[in-house]
Amino acid sequence: MAEPPDMAKRWRLLVSVLLAVSAVSQAQDGGVAQPAGVLLHAGQLVDVKAGRLLADQGILVVADRIAAVGPWADLQRRPAERTIDLTARVVLPGLIDAHTHLLANVPDGPGGYTLMLATRGPAYRALEGAANARATLMAGFTTVRDVESEGSGYADVALRDAIAAGLVDGPRMLVATRGIAAVGGYLPWRLNPELFTLLSGAQMVSGADEARRAAREQIRGGADHLKVYADWPDPKLEGQPRPTLMLEELRAVVEEAHQGGRKVAAHAVGPAGITHAVNAGVDKASTSEEREYASRRLEGIRKVLESARKLRVRLVLGSDPAEREAHGRNAEEAVLMVRFGVPPAEVLRAATVDAAALLDLSAKVGTVEVGKQADLIAVDGNPLADMTALRRIRFVMRAGKIYAEPATAAGR
């Protein structure tokens, strides 16, 4: 049915008005309609690739992306719904922790790990993880690689997905689910043998077939990467590490992971465990996860870092928090790295650019560049001169959403 003549005229008039308004808007914006967003005015911005400060910078965030970066004089007139004054702060990309256990809250005292497994189920552990995730985010860490759920099954997958859905506040998570260890090669120790199959910090395997099956099960369960324990301290050897998973077992896990486009992280402290892990093709070996073990060998860690830098091994930040008070203190790893002789610029790369590369996220995070996710933090002080500035978080944005601002962000 044809429209009445007067109705057709009204439609033509409405379209003409809309076109005129669009033309005026484009003319005012130099011929291209510009979306409104949030404009940040940074007193200084850390170029983490070059290890330098850029003064008086502007960052335009539209939705969850960085739309423009450059001198404030060039960006200050860009249309924005609001402008945030960070001129008294130093802005840098959101930090990345490549070794966390957000589901772990190990009680103090002997047997604390066993007590955690025996008294808290996956649901409660997930709620603890949500609290730890928020503490981590508010500490300026907008992305984490969580390297196994420490006996809470696939609760880390649920936490990852809840954060992605906006149900809880936390960093972007890559998760390893249950972890893979040899029978008798991981916590808890000193346990009633009849409880071995009930209380376990990881998925225990024996033989290449079981290792392969565990890898397949965890990938099916939602793992972004896999975690293996290539060795573990043996009480009978005065705490010295002994190999646990053998080369063929490690290779089976690596094959399954790589076929599924996933990487493998390995706990490897001793020479034999490290050799097995490297020969099996793991993508990252952690050479001193245990906090107690590390505290007794601080000089050794300093030498390891020194040797790694001489060999041009790429360093990434991994704080390995497992106790309640450790979550949200991820930046202490960066402070210690500087204390052990790593230049601040390298440490910041380890917590941004290089960590993003390890996680295959370089296209999304790790630097403040156009097109990347708007993961941004602001601190009091210059971390290139004083790494303790990372303890003084004043602004947190992840994927364009603001979680802390100068008026509300609490420093430590």
Image (spheres, rainbow, N blue to C red):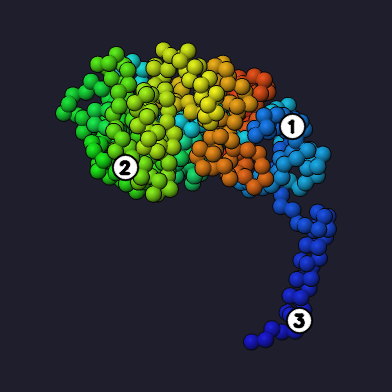
Residue 42 drawn at (x, y percent): 73, 33
> Residue 204 lies in what quarter of the image?
top left
Which residue ends up furthest to the left in the rendered image?
194
Residue 405 vertical position relative to residue 37 in the rendered view, above or below: above
Horizontal relation, residue 383 to residue 128: left or right? right
Quadrant position of the N terminus in the picture:
bottom right
User: Separation of disc 2 and disc 1 at Cα?
Assistant: 47 Å
- Can you tell which of label 1 and label 3 is closer to the viewer? 1
Q: Secondary structure at mark 3?
A: helix
Residue 25 drawn at (x, y percent): 80, 58
Bin the neighbour count of mark 1 within 10 Å (Cα to Cα): few under 14, some 14-19, many 20 and up: some
Residue identifier under label 2: 252
Q: Secondary structure at mark 1?
A: strand
Residue 2 vertical position relative to residue 77 in the rendered view, above or below: below
Q: Earlier in the sequence, mark 2 or mark 1?
A: 1
Residue identifier under label 3: 6
User: Separation of disc 2 and disc 3 at Cα?
Assistant: 75 Å
Q: Earlier in the sequence, mark 2 or mark 3?
A: 3
Disc 2 residue type (three-letter): Ala
Residue 16 drawn at (x, y percent): 79, 71
Residue identifier under label 1: 54
Q: Earlier in the sequence, mark 1 or mark 3?
A: 3
- Can you tell which of label 2 and label 1 is closer to the viewer? 2
Disc 1 residue type (three-letter): Leu
